Image: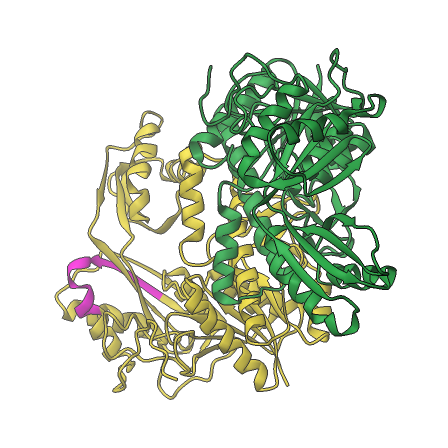
Chain colours: A green, B yellow
Amino acid sequence: MALYVMKFGGSSVGDTERMKRVAKRIAEKQDEGHQCVVVVSAMGDTTDDLIDQARLLNEEPPTRELDMLMTNGEQISIAMLSIALHAIGRKAVSYTGWQAGFRTESVFGKARITDIRPDKVKKALDEGHIVVVAGFQGMTEDFEITTFGRGGSDTTAVALAAAIEADVCEIYTDVDGIYSTDPRVVKVARKLQEISYDEMLELANLGAAVLHPRAVEYAKHHQVRLVVRSSFNYNEGTVVKEEANMEQGVVVSGIAFDKNVARISILGVSHIPGVLAKVFGSLAKAQIDVDIIVQSGVTDGKADFSFTVALTDRERAIQVIEGIREDLPFSEVNFEDNLVKISIVGAGMVSHPGVAAQMFEVISQQGVNIKMVSTSEIKVSCVIDNNKLQEVVAALHTAYNLDTQEQAFVGGPQDRR
Amino acid sequence: MALYVMKFGGSSVGDTERMKRVAKRIAEKQDEGHQCVVVVSAMGDTTDDLIDQARLLNEEPPTRELDMLMTNGEQISIAMLSIALHAIGRKAVSYTGWQAGFRTESVFGKARITDIRPDKVKKALDEGHIVVVAGFQGMTEDFEITTFGRGGSDTTAVALAAAIEADVCEIYTDVDGIYSTDPRVVKVARKLQEISYDEMLELANLGAAVLHPRAVEYAKHHQVRLVVRSSFNYNEGTVVKEEANMEQGVVVSGIAFDKNVARISILGVSHIPGVLAKVFGSLAKAQIDVDIIVQSGVTDGKADFSFTVALTDRERAIQVIEGIREDLPFSEVNFEDNLVKISIVGAGMVSHPGVAAQMFEVISQQGVNIKMVSTSEIKVSCVIDNNKLQEVVAALHTAYNLDTQEQAFVGGPQDRR
């Protein structure tokens, strides 16, 4: 007998039919002799619908009241799932985030967990219940209801798994597991049996949005064994754990790409340190995340430097820079869209020199210029024009021996059983 | 400056436009210099919609999970109303039932309030907030979410008014106040300026469904000054308080009628006491409420007796009685539908003998037979055929000097301001 935390996302419980399917899936797990704690998100578009309605009343709803509003999405889900479990003869009990013991800091819309007191959850498990917990939400010490921000249900599942010392935390989603790259772009993408927390963290942050980065961080910190698998079939998923078994000759585990990227360049800059501080200080103040930063050599005491921001932040970033132009000694600011950032990720890179060089070589063989580069211990990212994305990713995928002959399963509601 | 509790029902906050209107109404009260605590029900049909969806999963959802589900209706309402208040520049904060301090017994679907700890409510008021509280819900000492049953939002408003020592508890609804009888049946129905708790209690229990009986009981017990008024206009409502000022010569305050009534008769009964106990014990076990009970004289050691049940319970009641027939010495059971129970209510009755006699006389003048009678200190009820309902009510209304010349306002969303 093992203790499972099973997390189902909004699309897995999108309507009553899917809710029934999830209930059946949980019952099967219980029939195998396991204890089950289930974390669910709001059904389908419930959260967005609630926010849309609130906007009819107030274009900028206060975050405290938005949290009061949004948490109903999960509370409806848990009650419905528990009701569905009762319908097939299971003892089940649903708990809101605060009932399950989630305490958070006093920040609305993106609270961090400060403590988990899962007494009710443990007691209900001991009594033979399936425990259904609302994802994404908690309560401050002052009894205020808070949310963790988007993707927070993953964090609920992982944190609860750590708190109750679950054997496994299964994240059920609409894909089969973690792939070496997006199977919609590269048909021969390989489903990974295992991946390390660090690799997963890089992939999560790079926009391969299967798992929320905070959840992965939490899992790494508390050494929670994660499994990512599909809620629509019974295929084995991908295990996320501390040290993934290196397959022979595999230094790169995955290739991620991000089209939400724009380059901004500031030209003819003197007094570079002061300018950098001012520019990035102002951008940070405007809540604009900067990713890659590249500085060219200095000529005549002047230099150019470039950085990337999310495409969706580009216009605002330019405004911020123009806004501080008078205080700054630079001659010009320009930008470039239609870019993509391609990243190779692999824990094996550290011990295999030349991985980055190989990446540059493969990209240049495709006749593509590399515009910006950034590296970390387990990641190399290159920014290129986005018109050759597919060819470049496919070529890298082959070069790093990631191609598989099996057909990838891209997801969707095809219950194979 | 006074402290107001204002309660708005589901139809008053049925959509975002009505929500805005309610927000405006509250702001006006605040602008008059008052402190406001607002209790709201779920928006429009939200509760029924949630239950309908749950029934798709489970024909008999467990009551605990139904409470988890239904309470979202009010939690959505309070967040929306608070968001609407912020939109017009008001400091507002919403609290669920448990946040507002409502503690209940551990019964789902119809919990009674055991304690109210309104610390958060008082603190927020002191800070200048409008406090918006979810009706109909509370929490057990064991942190389980409970509901008070249908109409429970009235109880929330009254109980909270008592706990925070509010000056007035206003119940905003879709009618102008308490009428001497249903203005849809009698055009000359009179809106009462005042009514006593006891009279209101009788009217509430008789199906004049403006106020929930439990709320009236609570108000009487804690001497909460209630005002029933319309959320769609600014007319003065009806004050419900301990001793209503008797108007000159008015002994009957209101006439109520209930069409949801059926008569069941058991004929040829011997050993009457044993039979009565068995019949009404079995009916109570089946959760069937019995109202009027009448027993005829005894002939040859045998008697007939009759009682009324809700029309909707009639079929089940007959089944219950047939089910115990073999144990009982009676010769026949029959029933009658198409009935109505008409009741006159008035605190002045006690000191005015002959009120009941006058009622019987008026009814017989209409050529109508009285089938059953029941009396209390401030009420006389008669069961008659329902085909002369309108004439009988109108005749009684005139006989007891209740007619007014003013046109009654029957309600509906016609904001007169």
Left or right? Give the position of A122 relative to B63.
Answer: right
Residue A218 lies left or right of residue A65; in this view the side is right
In front of the other: A262 or A65: A262
Q: Which residue shows up at 55% across the image and 46% down it? A: A73
Q: Is B247 covered by the magenta stretch?
A: no
Q: Is residue A89 above or below residue A372?
A: above
**Whether residue A181 is visible:** yes
**Residue A108, relative to residue B252: is it above or below?**
above
Tell me, yes or no, if residue A37 can be seen here. no
Q: Residue at x 53, y 39 (%)?
A: A387
Q: Position of residue B47 (x, y in %)?
A: 45, 50
Nearer to me, A403 or B241: A403
Residue A128 sits above or below residue A384 on the image = above
Q: How many marks?
A: 0
Picture quarter with the N terminus of chain A: top right
Query: Looking at the picture, how far across and down is residue B178, in whole percent?
Result: 39, 74
Q: Quadrant of residue A117?
A: top right
Residue A21 point in image, percent of width and height: 48, 26
Residue B394: x percent and y percent?
21, 73
Left or right of A175: which side holds B256?
left
Residue found farthest to the left: B367
Residue at point 69%, 66% (across, down): A320
Residue at the front extreme, as displayed: A300
Specify the segment rendered in magenta: B380-392
Q: Nearer the viewer, residue A173 or A407?
A: A407
Q: Quadrant of residue A205?
A: top right
Residue drawn where x is 51% and y is 62% of the image? A55
Closest to the observer, B54 or B215: B54
Asked if residue B390 lies in the magenta stretch, the reply is: yes
